[in-house]
Amino acid sequence: CTCLCRAEATKVLERMRRGYTQEAYLALAEKMKATIPDLTLSTDIIAGFCGEEEEDHLQTLDVMKAVDYDLAYMFKYSTREKTHAHRRYEDDVPEHVKSRRLSEIIKTFYSGAEQKNQKEIGRVQ
C-alpha cells in the first residue's frame, strides 16, 4: 500500500492549500503504519515555497524523520504560471537558500534510506 502526501510545515501546507496540518498528517501516518503491515509511504517535498522560513524548513526535516519515507520526490520551488501560488504569492526565497534546503532534504531522505537498507543486510526475503 502506498500513500502520497506533502511533508511540509503547517504554514507551508496552508499556503499550498492542502487542507490538513502537519500534526494531523503525522497522526494519520502513525495510525496507518500501525494498522497496515509493510506500508510504503512516499511524499513530494518542495524546498523554498513562497514565504517558507528557516523554521518551516526545519519542521519539514522533522516530518521526514518522523515518517521515515520509503520514496520521496524532492524539488526546489519554481513559479508555474496560472497557479494559485503564481497569482497570490511572491517567489521570495533566494535561489541559493532553495538549493541549500533541497540539499538538506535529500541528505535527510538518504540518511533514513541507508538506515533501512542496513537493517535488510543478511535478511532473506
Image (cartoon, rainbow, N blue to C red):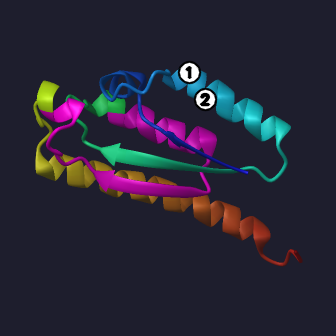
Q: Farthest residue in the right direction?
A: 124
**Amino acid found under the numbered disc labelled 1:** Glu
* Rendered residue at 51%/62% (across/down): 110
* Rendered residue at 10%/31% (across/down): 90
- Give coordinates of residue 97: x percent, y percent: 18, 46
- Picture quarter containing residue 70? bottom right
**Mark 2: which secondary structure?**
helix
Position of the C terminus, as image quadrant, is: bottom right
Residue beneath label 1, please?
23
For the residues labelled 2 and 1, say whether their Cβ atoms are less than 8 Å apart: yes
Verify whether residue 59 appears in magenta: yes
Verify whether residue 5 appears in magenta: no
Cα–Cα span, label 2 and label 1 = 5 Å
Horizontal side, residue 86 vs residue 108: left or right: left
Q: Nearer the viewer, residue 123 or 1?
A: 1
Horizontal side, residue 36 vs residue 70: left or right: right
* 60 up-or-down from 40: above or below: above
Mark 2 is surrounded, within 10 Å at the Cα level, by few (under 14), some (14 to 19) or many (20 or more) other residues, namely: some
Q: Which mark is residue 26?
A: 2
- Give coordinates of residue 49: x percent, y percent: 25, 38
Horizontal side, residue 86 vs residue 54: left or right: left
- Give coordinates of residue 1: x percent, y percent: 73, 51
**Amino acid found under the numbered disc labelled 2:** Leu
**Mark 1: which secondary structure?**
helix
Q: Is residue 72 visible?
A: yes
- Picture quarter containing residue 46? top left
Mark 1 is surrounded, within 10 Å at the Cα level, by few (under 14), some (14 to 19) or many (20 or more) other residues, namely: few
* Rendered residue at 58%/28% (across/down): 25
* Rendered residue at 11%/35% (across/down): 92
Horizontal side, residue 5 vs residue 14: left or right: right
Point out the stretch of residues depicted in magenta. Answer: 57-86
Q: Which mark is residue 54?
A: none
